[in-house]
Amino acid sequence: MLSLNRNFAGMKVIVDDKIPYIKGLIEQLCEEVVYLPGASISAEDVKDADIMIVRTRTRCDARLLTGSKVKLVVTATIGYDHFDTAYLQKAGIKWTNCPGCNANSVRQYVHNALLTCDVKDATIGVVGVGHVGSRVADDCLKAGMRVLMCDPPRARNEKDFCNTPLSEMAEKCDIITFHTPLSREGEDATFHLADADFFRSLKRKPIIINSSRGEVVDNQALVEALDNGLVSKAIIDTWENEPNLNLELLQRAYIATPHIAGYSADGKANATRMSLQAVAEFLGVPFTLKVEAPSLPENFSYGSEKEGELRLYDPRVDSEKLKQNPELFEQLRGNYPLRRERK
């Protein structure tokens, strides 16, 4: 067990109780650990805490943190739009996310969802080419697809980045998949990036995939695009107003899942490891903890490549569960079964 730095003995940490593989490890860094449901963490809960480790269901802002002792907030996720970063900076509260932690898990989700479709000789547009989108793009190139990439910030900063405007993707793509963060202001705002005007501009009745943030796609506009034949299929993992889903979109979607694209055991382990490492760095202690995902059963067999990929993970199974019980969105997400990536 690690020896606590004396300057930080007695540190109290609030932890989202759905973060996997963390129990028994965070206790080696902080003396007092309190596990709570992320959506119900309150100002009263955190007022005497020093550190928080959360997920997307905990909004970290002035309402939650004003008057508290908190000096570090960590989200065990890639996205951090649930953090009021301007407030945190002003309040002197350090914050960090886990960039790239579940990128390969989302890649697996998109790859396996497309395995269930006829995408031979397809042109795919990848919108947002960061940790996740770059892996998806590489995967699709290896599968023989023509890949177009849209990432204006990268295009401005990298002279060799071949950027395809979203308007051009709307004309040329058979599949369009979104992998952007959520931002509401500025020239690269992504809120309702796919809106009614975007859907009306589509020329090839593409498959639309959203596994980024729900608000990147106008959900009601997507329903109308499906109804009007502008979109052939929708594969939706992230939703506006989670967990209160657009039930029309839920039933119209080809694959509809409860925000679990990044929920492979491997991705979860990466996020927990990065979160613990951030805490250790903040406390000034060496990081030697090991976070490992459970192994597959010894008798697991891949079979053929496509068969094996879908045996490892078939998103249609998660989709059927959600469509049958949309009211269980949070339970399906919070009690997600073991899912491994192919090594």
Image (cartoon, grey):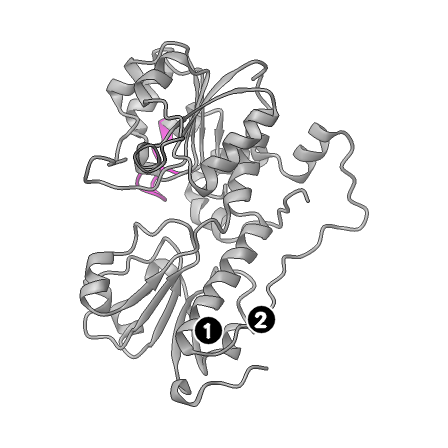
Q: Is residue 2 above or below residue 80?
A: below
Q: Secondary structure at mark 2?
A: loop
CA separation in Å, label 2 and label 1: 10 Å
Instruction: Magenta stretch: give its range.
Output: 238-248
**Could you tell whether 114 is left or right of 54 in the image?**
right
- Name the amino acid type tagged 1: Ala
The residue pinned by badge 1 equals 280
Left-right relation of 245 to 175:
left
> x and y percent of residue 316 in the render?
57, 31
Q: In the drawing, does residue 3 fall left or right of residue 298?
A: left
Which residue is disc 2 drawn over? 289
Residue at 61% x, 27% y is: 142
Q: Give the image location of residue 191, x and y in percent.
A: 26, 35
Task: Tell me: 259 left or right of 83.
Answer: right
Cβ–Cβ below 8 Å for labels 2 and 1?
A: yes
Q: Locate residue 7: give its quadrant.
A: bottom left
- Quadrant containing the N terminus in the rendered view: bottom right
Quarter holding the C terminus is top right
Out of 320 and 4, give the one closest to the viewer: 4
Q: Residue furthest front?
A: 159
